[in-house]
Image (cartoon, rainbow, N blue to C red):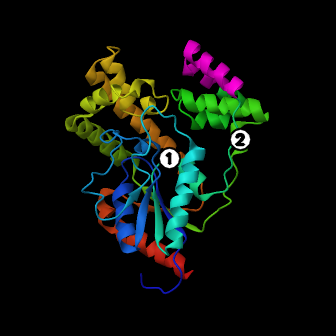
C-alpha cells in the first residue's frame, strides 16, 4: 500500500454468487498481508467442494483461508457459532497487525461477524413443535405463516429453507416481535471497508448457468452420492444447499438428473437476486463492476478503494 496510515480494520468482499468474490479476496489478501476468512455458509462444510464452488487447494495456496471445512454435513449451521469463530480469526489477525479479508455471499454471516448482532436464545419446546409442523406440513405452510407475521422476513427467507423459517418463527414466538425487529441496524464492531462485486443481471445469469454445467462435469452427482453416505440427507442445513438438494431429489428418484440440473440453475438465479437485495440495503457497501469488460480492472479498483479509505 502507498499510504503509511493505518489500514482498515476489516475488509469484506460481498455480493451475489458467481460474481468473482473469491479471486478478488485472494488478490487483496496478497496485496495487504492478510488472510481470507470464509463467509459462505455452505463452504463451512467438509466435502461440499464442487457444489459450493470452493477454491481448490492450489487456488488458495497463495494465502491462508480460514473457516473452510470446519463442520460435518450432519451439523446444523449456527450464525451465532460462526460469529464466535469469525471474530476469533479477525481478532487474531488484528493482533498480528495483519488484514482480515472476509469473503462470501451469506449476508447474515457477514453482518454477524462485523456488526453488533446479538442472537435471541432458543426454546427447545417451541423449536420441537415447529420442527414437527415442518415435518408434517412442509416448509411452504410455515413460510406462509412467517410472511403474514413478518413480511420482510418472508421476502428474505426462501420458502424452501425450512430451518431458517423455523428459527424465524421461534424468535417471533419467544420475543413477541417480528424476526427482523431482532436484527439491529449497522452498528459496527470493527472498522470495515465493504466491497460489493456487481455483475449485470444477464451476464450473472449466464455465469450461473455455466457454473452449474461445470459443477456437473466436475462430478457434483458423485460428490453428493459420497456425502449421502456421511449423513448429508439427514443434515438439516447442508441438505438444503443449492445443487445438493436437487441432486438428492434425483438420487431419490423424485426427478431426473437433467431436471435437477435445470432446477439448480433456476434456484441459484433466484438466490443471487436475494443476495444482491440483502447487500444493497447496506449503504456502507461500495460497489465495483465485476462485468467481463471491467473484470481486469476490478482488482486494482478494489485496492484503490481500500487505499482511499485509509487516507480518508
Query: Visible in this render: residue 280?
Result: no
Q: Earlier in the sequence, mark 1 or mark 2?
A: 1
Q: Work out whether 88 lies above or below 276.
A: below
Q: Where's the N terminus, which quadrant?
A: bottom left
Q: Where's the C terminus, which quadrant?
A: bottom right
Q: Secondary structure at mark 1?
A: loop
User: CA gap, disc 1 to disc 2?
Assistant: 19 Å
Residue to which mark 1 is pinned: 106
Residue to which mark 2 is pinned: 120
Where residue 240 appears, x then y in whole percent? 45, 30
In the rendered structure, does residue 77 fall within the stretch colored magenta? no
Residue 283 found in image quarter: bottom right
Where residue 268 appears, x then y in whole percent? 40, 37
Within 10 angstroms of label 2, few (less than 14), some, or many (20 or more) residues?
A: some
In the rendered structure, does residue 130 fall within the stretch colored magenta? yes
The circle on residue 36 is: none
- Residue under the image location 53 percent in, 72 percent down: 95
Query: Is the stretch drawn in magenta largely helix, strand or loop?
Result: helix
CB atoms of marks 1 and 2 within 8 Å: no
Front residue of 308 and 119? 119
Residue range (magenta): 124-145
Amino acid at each position: 500500500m502507498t499510504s503509511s496510515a493505518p489500514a482498515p480494520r476489516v475488509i469484506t468482499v460481498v455480493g451475489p454468487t458467481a460474481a468473482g468474490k473469491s479471486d478478488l479476496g485472494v488478490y487483496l489478501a496478497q496485496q495487504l498481508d492478510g488472510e481470507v476468512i470464509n463467509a459462505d455458509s455452505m463452504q463451512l462444510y467438509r466435502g461440499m467442494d464442487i457444489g459450493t464452488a470452493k477454491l481448490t487447494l492450489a487456488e488458495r495456496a497463495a494465502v491462508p483461508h480460514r473457516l473452510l471445512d470446519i463442520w460435518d454435513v450432519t451439523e446444523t449451521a449456527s450464525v451465532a457459532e460462526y460469529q464466535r469463530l469469525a471474530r476469533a480469526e479477525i481478532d487474531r489477525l488484528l493482533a498480528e497487525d495483519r488484514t482480515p479479508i472476509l469473503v462470501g455471499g451469506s449476508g447474515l454471516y457477514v453482518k454477524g461477524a462485523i456488526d453488533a448482532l446479538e442472537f435471541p436464545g432458543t426454546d427447545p419446546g417451541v423449536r420441537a413443535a415447529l420442527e414437527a409442523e415442518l415435518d408434517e406440513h412442509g416448509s411452504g405452510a410455515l413460510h406462509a405463516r412467517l410472511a403474514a407475521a413478518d413480511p420482510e422476513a418472508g421476502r428474505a427467507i426462501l420458502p424452501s429453507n425450512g430451518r431458517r423459517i423455523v428459527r424465524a418463527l421461534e424468535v417471533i414466538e419467544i420475543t413477541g416481535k417480528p424476526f427482523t425487529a431482532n436484527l439491529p441496524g449497522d452498528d459496527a464492531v470493527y472498522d470495515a471497508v465493504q466491497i460489493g462485486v456487481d455483475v449485470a443481471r444477464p451476464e450473472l445469469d449466464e455465469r450461473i448457468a455455466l457454473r452449474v454445467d461445470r459443477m456437473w462435469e466436475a462430478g457434483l452427482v458423485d460428490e453428493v452420492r459420497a456425502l449421502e453416505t456421511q449423513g448429508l440427507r439427514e443434515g438439516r442445513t447442508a441438505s438444503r444447499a443449492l445443487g445438493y438438494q436437487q441432486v438428492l431429489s434425483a438420487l431419490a428418484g423424485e426427478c431426473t438428473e437433467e431436471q435437477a440440473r435445470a432446477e439448480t440453475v433456476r434456484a441459484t438465479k433466484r438466490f443471487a437476486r436475494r443476495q444482491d437485495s440483502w447487500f444493497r440495503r447496506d449503504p456502507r457497501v461500495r460497489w465495483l463492476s465485476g462485468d467481463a469488460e471491467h473484470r481486469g480492472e476490478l482488482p486494482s479498483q478494489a485496492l484503490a478503494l481500500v487505499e482511499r479509505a485509509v487516507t480518508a
